[in-house]
Image (spheres, coloured by chain):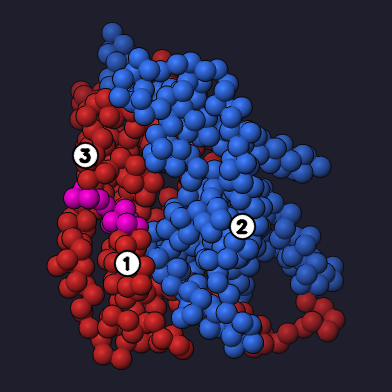
Chain colours: A blue, B red
Amino acid sequence: MRLIGRRQVAWWFAAPALVVIGVFFVLPVVAALAMSLTDFDIYALADISNLRVVGVRNYVDLLERPLFWKALGNTLYFVAAGVPLSLGASLGAALLLDSKFARFQPFFRTALFAPVVTTVVAVAVIWRYLLGTRYGYLNYALGVFGVRPIDWLGDPRFAMPAIILFAVWKNFGYNMIILLAGLQNIPRELYEAARIDGASAFERFRFVTLPMLAPILSIVAILTVAGYFQLFAEPYVMTQGGPLQSTLSVLYLMYEEGFKYWNLGSASAVAFLLFLLIFAVTLLQTRAARGEFAR
Amino acid sequence: MSGVAVPLPRTGTIVVNALLIGASALALFPLLWMLAASFMAPGEASAYPPPLVPSHPTLANYRELFAHAGMGRYLANSVLLAVAATALSLVFNVTAGYAFAKLDFRGRDRLFRLMLGALVIPGQVAMVPLFLLLKHMGLVNTYGGVIVPALASIFGIFLVRQYALSIPDDLLEAARIDGASEWRIFVLVVVPLLKPIIVTLAVFTLLGTWNDFMWPLIVLSDQDLYTLPVALASLSREHVQDNELMMAGAVLTTLPVLVVFLSLQRYYMQGLMLGAVKG
């Protein structure tokens, strides 16, 4: 009797959160799949009887649109260049902080982490100025080395690199903290043993640090890739997807399709394609990581 | 370190710390410059070479933001939404996280595994139908529209559950034998034990809702309801040339979260680690 009563109470503890997640997350995700098979647009928004089921036409239309491929290409560019640079910066900073020579570690850790907690929109506004052609600091610094001013955000060749640079600055601190904890968990005796065997600093990094860090490194890589696929606020504030759509991301395309042109069916299809892409890449990475550790 | 590459400890100290200073300078420079430029007179930052410090520090930009750009209103919106979303979501997530760790109900473990699986679905997939749902409920373009989807999060429940697993069952059993109800046990025994993770989750949620951009941008259309990031994005499109004004806006948007982070850093870092362990 008491046990049954207790089980009911337990449901009351869990139910409010589960209802919220069910209604405001699970239901919309399922509905997104259903909507992506309809021509839900501004007319259907006004009167639902205008809604028609169109099967996979939204998907076919998207795959035939050059703009979708452009957005996909830009997003893949951002992920392929941004993730390795981010992880490299994170690992470099973590190694410096973990070094036995490092002084004032708490101060440096906080300083390097600070960009992570800032608001993307606000720091994107700052960077828009720093990347300015005439008065920006980046061009000023490059000018010292004789580089002519670059129109970072106005030139289709440089806009995405500029956004990648910004994203690396904004995000590297997050993984740095996780990798630092991983480094601190590596038993010091392993380094000692390697040293006694005559391993150089680089060899110790290659054969002790990297293998010991590999599990954390692969988790961090998987999470970062999934996060970088969701590029939106940076181009929204810094370039508005331009110039010449060179920074239009898949998520930006979804936003414009859905909330600018009110093609909600098509926007749902974009969202679902993005989800499938992230899912597939995550799966591949997980497989690769497992294979790596099985060896 | 063998062969030629034997740096003396002093050299190592100098190299490592010089690199740390350089990296920290790069990380902090945009933020420090934002602060400096926010006190510059209009137009002062548009000069070559770019100035580092204001020649005559002025509060004009801040005055302008509050007097003519409605900044006070946006600041109040942001504070209200972040505090309300944090307080309410704590109630939902802490009770659920505790239930998943320590209370027995049918299908508990299967449900938990399902929820962890759902973490791979990016929130943006839900946004279009969520918008229609909230429109149907009359919540589009209201504070409620921003708060309601944030009321519970799988990540929050997960965080609390992991921490609550360490509560000894004997302690709860003893309270039950003493005749305490489950709610009483929760409030008097469990919540005090969970305090560290509650603070951690509070900091995470507060910073997360404060910094959130895409959802408020979608769900709020009335300018009077804009949060700081949405207002700043819109202002920055109007005032492309007013760098100093925008820097003051950026200071007002980032300074509060930086202060919260600096004062509760220990809890924040702990949450970051807990979240990454299971990923």
- Say which element carries label 1: loop
Q: CA distance from mark 1 to mark 2?
A: 29 Å
Where's the N terminus of chain A, which quadrant?
top left
Residue B236 lies, in percent from the top left, at: 34, 63
For disc 1, the chain is B
Q: Specify the quadrant of the image occupied by residue A47.
A: top left
For the view shown, which residue lies furthest in the left direction? B67
Q: Which residue is mark 2?
A: A82
| Vertical side of B157 occupied by A166: above or below | below
Q: Specify the quadrant of the image occupied by residue B53.
A: bottom left
- The reply to whether the C-beta atoms of the residues labelled 1 and 2 are less than 8 Å apart is no
Q: Nearer the viewer, mark 1 or mark 2?
A: 1
Q: Pointer 2: residues within 10 angstroms few (<14), some, or many (20+)?
A: many
Residue B268 lies, in percent from the top left, at: 39, 55
Q: Which residue is mark 3?
A: B142
For the view shown, which residue lies furthest in the top direction? A1
Q: Which residue is mark 1?
A: B239
Q: Which residues are magenta?
A: B223-234
Precedes in sequence: disc 3 or disc 1: 3
Residue type at tag 1: His
Drawn side of residue B18 relative to residue B192, left or right: right
Drawn side of residue A102 relative to residue B230, left or right: right
